[in-house]
Amino acid sequence: MASGKNPLFDTATTLGKILAFLGVSAICGVLVAGLMVPAAAVTGSAANGSVQFFNSLPSELTVTPPGQVTKVLAADGSQIATLFNENRTPLKLDQMSPNIKNAIVAIEDYRFYEHGGVDMTGILRALASNVRGGRQGASTLTQQYVTNVINENLVSQNKDSEVVLNGQKGVGDKLREMKLAIALEKQYSKDQILEGYLNLVFFNRNAYGIQAASQYFFSVDAKDLTLPQAATLAGL
């Protein structure tokens, strides 16, 4: 969810501000170069590899069905227990209230339907804020979804120790996250990404995905969330 305490660089000092400027400039340069590769008339295995990266998804980003609740029923069909590692009930996007879709986009990534996975405007805006001493991140919903998919796959393989949290990411991790986000947007629609994000993201109190969060915090289904309820969940 929203993470105002995860800046890409520490900008508390003048040196930090200079490094922030140089670092983000370097990131912008790498991304622009990566985006231009498919359109350039370049030959050789390196160029072909770059094009392939953006036009396909690596195995670590394979979108698999997330873990969900198993219900234990009695002989008469009544529910007697639920078993889960992650309390989650996946839904289709049209089974979710428009309020939560609008709230998530407005709070997390209001340019979601305009960018191609990485929001260069958002990066520059975050840089300007951080140079002034503020704390602002620039990860898009697509980037956040990438991180959640990778971490979910690691957990499902019992590789919890390899999970990298946002606050622990280095510049290399962020660059790879950006490249994967660009590749993901070439394979999936915006609605597919938003649906996946809302089913996967952790909302707190062992509530994974919007349906579990809606039931836990407000005792309603995700399709019935009001605007204030949706805004509350989006801001967690």
Image (cartoon, grey):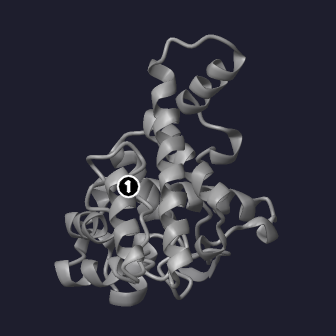
Quick one: label 1, few (<14), some, or many (20+) residues within 10 Å?
many
Q: Is residue 77 visible?
A: no
Pick the residue in front: 233 or 92. Answer: 233
Seen as rendered, the residue at the extreme left is 227
The residue located at (26%, 61%) in the rendering is 110
Residue behind mark 1: 194
Pick the residue in front: 71 or 47. Answer: 47
Q: Is residue 216 visible?
A: yes
Pick the residue in front: 174 or 235. Answer: 174
User: Residue 213, position in %: x, y?
Assistant: 42, 79
The residue located at (32%, 75%) in the rendering is 221
Question: Is residue 225 rendered to the left or right of residue 129?
Answer: left
User: Residue 5, position in %: x, y?
Assistant: 48, 83
User: Residue 64, position in %: x, y?
Assistant: 61, 49
The residue located at (55%, 72%) in the rendering is 9
- Type of the residue with mark 1: Leu
